[in-house]
Amino acid sequence: RARVAILVSGRGSNMAALIDAAAEPGYPAEIVAVVSNRPNAGALAVAERAGIPTAVVDHKLFPSRDAFDAELDRTLAGFTPEIVCLAGFMRLLTGGFIARWEGRMLNIHPALLPSFKGLDTHRRALETGVRLHGCTVHLVTEEMDAGPIVAQAAVPVLDGDDEASLAARVLTAEHLLYPRALALWASGRARLVDGKVVVDGPDEPPSPF
Ligand code: GAR
């Protein structure tokens, strides 16, 4: 089983979905640590209740991004993870940090990339009038929200949706998608070929929405 550390900044519902999935027999990864850049992130208490070791690297205590990332790296090293999952981790990481974890760091983004990179994805999806929206798990590369796509799930945008209702529909899909994508990557079924992800074996189930 691959050793996985999860980086969080907030409530940690995607983290919880990964922890729950990893508790199932046969899941190809184990969650060995949860690290937050915010001392008061709700995710920390959720992880502790699940018996997962936690750590805080408070970005406010560091003079630069480099200094923060160096401490984050040291903290992660103490847990000897093989894969790092960003789950609502809201800090930009430096190129050096990303390079060290290249091919071993996943992120979940609340949109169908390459549409709606960055923040406020649900508001912008509604403003644009797309009829399908969703979420993406991708490998983290230096360019934000642009790394190779491991898995995506689509949800409809319904007439009358507001930001909250659309976010909730996407979040439900995120909680199914991230554990599936991590399993693909951790097991080696998904791998990079010419900068794109290919998945060996039977097709993944289509998006349930
Ligand atoms: C999730 O919707 C995740 O996709 C998003 O933040 C939320 C975190 O919720 N991530 C980003 O926007 C990354 N830029 P959670 O803490 O309950 O998992």
Image (cartoon, grey):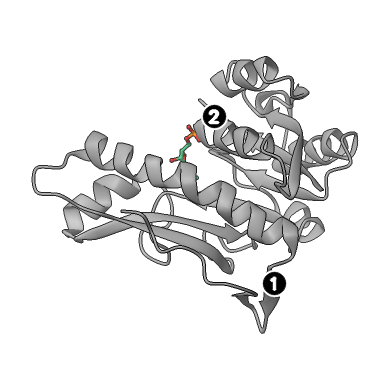
Q: Kindly identify the residue that appears in the image at 66 percent across and 84 percent down.
A: 194
Q: Kindly identify the residue that appears in the image at 25 percent across and 60 percent down.
A: 132
Mark 2 is on which residue type? Gly
* In the image, the residue with mark 2 has its CB under 8 Å from the nearest atom of ligand 1: yes
Residue bearing mark 2: 12
Q: Kindly identify the residue that appears in the image at 51 percent across and 65 percent down.
A: 204
Q: Report x, y in % for residue 102.
A: 75, 62
Mark 1 is on which residue type? Arg
Q: Kindly identify the residue that appears in the image at 62 percent across and 23 percent down.
A: 38
Q: CA distance from mark 2 to mark 1?
A: 27 Å
Between 185 and 208, the one lying in front of the other is: 208
Q: Report x, y in % for residue 73.
A: 82, 41
Question: In the rendered structure, which disc, 2 or 1, sits on the residue that comes first in sequence?
Answer: 2
| Quadrant of residue 101 within the rendered picture | bottom right
Above or below, comparing residue 55 to residue 196 in the picture: above
Above or below, comparing residue 73 to residue 38 in the picture: below
| Quadrant of residue 172 within the rendered picture | top left
Q: Is residue 110 left or right of residue 98?
A: left
Number of labels in the image equals 2
Q: Report x, y in % for residue 68.
A: 75, 36
User: In the image, which is nearer the foreground, mark 2 or mark 1?
Assistant: 1
Q: Is residue 110 left or right of residue 147?
A: left
Crowd rating for badge 2 (residues with CA inside 10 Å; few <14, some 14–19, many 20+): many
Between 95 and 172, the one lying in front of the other is: 172
Q: Report x, y in % for residue 50.
A: 67, 20
Between 133 and 177, the one lying in front of the other is: 177
Between 83 and 173, the one lying in front of the other is: 173
Above or below, comparing residue 206 to residue 208 in the picture: below
* In the image, the residue with mark 1 has its CB under 8 Å from the nearest atom of ligand 1: no
Residue bearing mark 1: 191
Q: Are marks 2 and 1 in contact (CB under 8 Å)?
A: no
